[in-house]
Image (spheres, coloured by chain):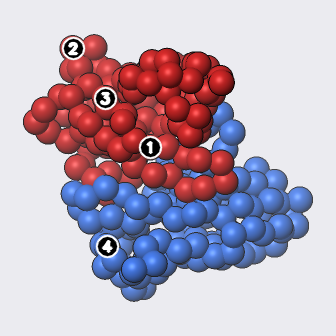
Amino acid sequence: AQSVTQLGSHVSVSEGALVLLRCNYSSSVPPYLFWYVQYPNQGLQLLLKYTTGATLVKGINGFEAEFKKSETSFHLTKPSAHMSDAAEYFCAVSDTGGGADGLTFGKGTHLIIQP
Amino acid sequence: NAGVTQTPKFQVLKTGQSMTLQCAQDMNHEYMSWYRQDPGMGLRLIHYSVGAGITDQGEVPNGYNVSRSTTEDFPLRLLSAAPSQTSVYFCASSTRTDTQYFGPGTRLTVL
């Protein structure tokens, strides 16, 4: 069975500081990994995904994540936080490339940006 | 394209009532899924479908029914609502290898 652990239900950073959101996964097969963002009272928007190939994945809004198989991690980073980055972030794993047979989500990390 | 649409946006039910949450997509995706989102729990898969006429259970299927008679529609039925089903419900669709696209959600309260 797959599982996703997101360390820290709340993360607070200052505007302009590095954003680091942690995600560890377990999977019995080579995983497909995703980060989604949810703004208040909205649906989920894909930030980036890892399927195969390059382990450093670049996404929208300046975010990127690195797949580290040896550490079973897929941490999300952004060099400089902006006030508009305040949102809920979810890491997810799937056996299939698109998660078509369902994604397994972490519990989410609420990112707070301090002015 | 409208993408994935969900109706209603908000619903209040009394315990024991039934209702259907509607989900439709106009992208000709064969795969569709229903999730529920609860505070501190992330999103959990309720049911999914890999094509018209084919459905399967996810992590939390109890209390919910689904059917898929067309490619476009994937309704979620609550036969006898319970307070534990108070949640935000999201529908998603995709092809086999493409990313899932999520609808805007339905916020359901069961009193």
Which subunit holds the residue at mark 4? Answer: B
Labels 3 and 4 touching (C-beta < 8 A):
no
Host chain of mark 2? A
Work out whether B74 lies above or below B44: below
Q: CA distance from mark 2 to mark 4?
A: 35 Å
Name the residue rendered at 24%, 26% in the picture: A67
Chain shown blue: that is B
Query: Mark 1 or mark 3, which is nearer the start of the sequence?
Result: 1
Q: Are marks 2 and 4 in contact (CB under 8 Å)?
A: no
Specify the chain shown as red.
A
Q: Tags 3 and 2 in contact by the CB under 8 Å rule?
A: no
Given the image, on which type of amino acid does mark 4 rest?
Answer: His
Residue lying at 61% horizontally and 62% vertically, measured from the top left: B105
Q: Are marks 2 and 4 on the same chain?
A: no
Q: Look at label 2 and name its amino acid.
A: Ser
**Which of pointers 3 and 2 indicates the residue nearer the eye?**
3
Marking on residue B29: 4
Q: Which residue is mark 3?
A: A65
Viewer can see residue B72: yes
Q: Residue at x 57, y 19 (%)?
A: A13
Residue of label 2: A70
Residue B64 rendering spot, x and y as whole percentages: 61, 64
Determine the residue positioned at 53% across, 36% down.
A85
Residue farthest toward the top in the current orientation of the protein = A71
Tell me how far mark 1 sits from mark 2, CA to CA.
23 Å
Q: Which mark is residue A36?
A: 1
